[in-house]
């Protein structure tokens, strides 16, 4: 790591809340580091404590113990107006911004520099333009916030955080209301932003596959309060990723990087070979029907997937009759009608 110090760090931090005057710890002894230029995804199942950690790091909720450092300065020593130039927080929940338009809301991101009644100078306008361009919200600027869809509002709130131009950006479930293309775009955008501008970005999400693809580091918050950190691929290979989300009836497939419903062991096994894409999608379909995939060809059920005249074909290699099928649906029908091919 070339950068000399992390933008955000914790030392023996304990997070949680107070109930009837007593502290309830969710996670403790947290020694975390968020480095410039890095996108970190905070993952954990429902109720594991992601929002609590985000809110504590942003100073919205008191830590139960330990220290938080923003650029090596203790958070408790930083005045709110100074912190607002260092760290921005984007929450998923509806924020009350009155009857403001999207543009007026984004302009509010400049408040730490202009004051509440301050006029926007050229630098302010430039930062706002960049934020609007980056988040692609120019068509929404004249609309009132309450007129926007959840996904549109989420993008506008991100634009406001970008206009705030802080080195640290924390986002609580920024993809929650977005459709798939917009979720992918948002994660890609945040990754690019971290890389190009050397900002340190931490986001919480339930998008496991997108986090695996885009995050430089993962922070995995487990149900027992343990927090495991590392490069996504390391956490997959050492089993931490799967164990953080382990649930009866689900299993994690390291080959595809996805969770799937665990079926009872298949009553018959198939061996698949051929075109990589066809094999992948055929596997998904036959596994759903309870078939096991054999890694060696020594099964009596062997299928070769090929393309003939640009069309997919499934050849049953050891069938009594030389059979060629032209869709996965036909293959599933065939498998269903027999106990073996
Ligand atoms: N003020 C509070 N009073 C009582 N319980 C609380 C309070 N704040 C948080 N909790 C509990 O702490 C746990 C963690 O909550 P938190 O909102 O941080 O989880 P999360 O990981 O963000 O969940 P989700 O993925 O569902 O948004 C939950 O069990 C929640 O009920």
Image (cartoon, rainbow, N blue to C red):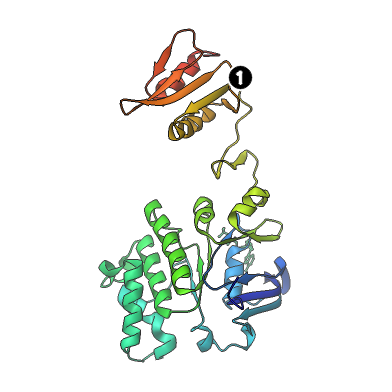
Dividing the picture into quadrants, the one containing residue 229 is: bottom right
Q: How many residues crowd around disc 1 within 10 Å: few (fewer than 14), some, or many (20 or more)?
A: few
Residue at the spot x=57%, y=69% of the render?
Answer: 54
**Quarter of the image containing the N terminus?**
bottom right
Residue at the spot x=41%, y=75% of the render?
Answer: 162
User: Closer to the camera, 145 or 133?
Assistant: 133
Position of residue 39 in the picture relative to residue 162 (left or right)? right
Q: Is residue 22 visible?
A: yes
Mark 1 CB near ligand 1 (8 Å cut)? no
Quadrant assignment for ligand 1: bottom right
Residue found at the far front of this picture: 2
Q: Is residue 19 visible?
A: no
Residue at the spot x=60%, y=35% of the render?
Answer: 262
User: Closer to the camera, 32 or 105?
Assistant: 32
Dividing the picture into quadrants, the one containing residue 257 is: top right
Task: Give coordinates of residue 64: x percent, y percent.
Answer: 70, 75
Which residue is labeled 1 in the image?
298
Numbered disc total: 1
């Amino acid at each position: 790591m070339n950068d000399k110090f992390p933008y955000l760090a914790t030392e023996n931090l304990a997070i949680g809340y107070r109930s009837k005057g007593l502290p309830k710890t969710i996670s403790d002894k947290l020694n975390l580091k968020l480095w410039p230029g890095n996108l970190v995804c905070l993952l954990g199942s429902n109720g594991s404590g992601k929002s609590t950690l985000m809110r504590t790091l942003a100073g919205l909720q008191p830590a139960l113990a330990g220290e938080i450092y923003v650029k090596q300065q203790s958070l408790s020593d930083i005045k709110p107006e100074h912190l607002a130039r260092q760290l921005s927080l984007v929450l998923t929940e509806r924020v009350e911004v009155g009857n403001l338009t999207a543009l007026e809301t984004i302009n509010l991101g400049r408040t730490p520099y202009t004051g509440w009644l301050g006029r926007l100078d050229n630098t302010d306008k430039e930062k706002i333009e960049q934020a609007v361009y980056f988040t692609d919200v120019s068509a929404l600027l004249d609309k009132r916030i309450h007129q926007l869809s959840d996904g549109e509002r989420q993008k506008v709130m991100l634009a406001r955080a970008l206009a705030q131009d802080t080195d640290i950006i924390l986002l609580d479930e920024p993809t929650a209301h977005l459709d798939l293309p917009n979720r992918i775009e948002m994660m890609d955008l945040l990754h690019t932003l971290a890389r190009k501008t050397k900002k340190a970005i931490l986001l919480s999400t339930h998008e496991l596959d997108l986090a695996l693809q885009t995050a430089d580091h993962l922070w995995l918050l487990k149900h027992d309060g343990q927090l495991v950190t590392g490069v996504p691929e390391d956490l997959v290979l050492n089993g931490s990723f799967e164990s953080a989300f382990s649930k009866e009836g689900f299993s994690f497939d390291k080959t595809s990087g996805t969770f799937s419903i665990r079926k009872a062991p298949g009553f018959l096994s198939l061996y698949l070979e051929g075109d990589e894409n066809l094999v992948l999608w055929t596997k998904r379909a036959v596994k759903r029907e309870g078939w096991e995939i054999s890694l060696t060809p020594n099964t009596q059920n062997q299928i070769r997937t090929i393309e003939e005249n640009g069309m997919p074909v499934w050849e049953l290699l050891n069938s009594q009759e030389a059979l060629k099928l032209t869709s996965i649906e036909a293959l599933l029908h065939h498998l269903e009608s027999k106990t073996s091919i």
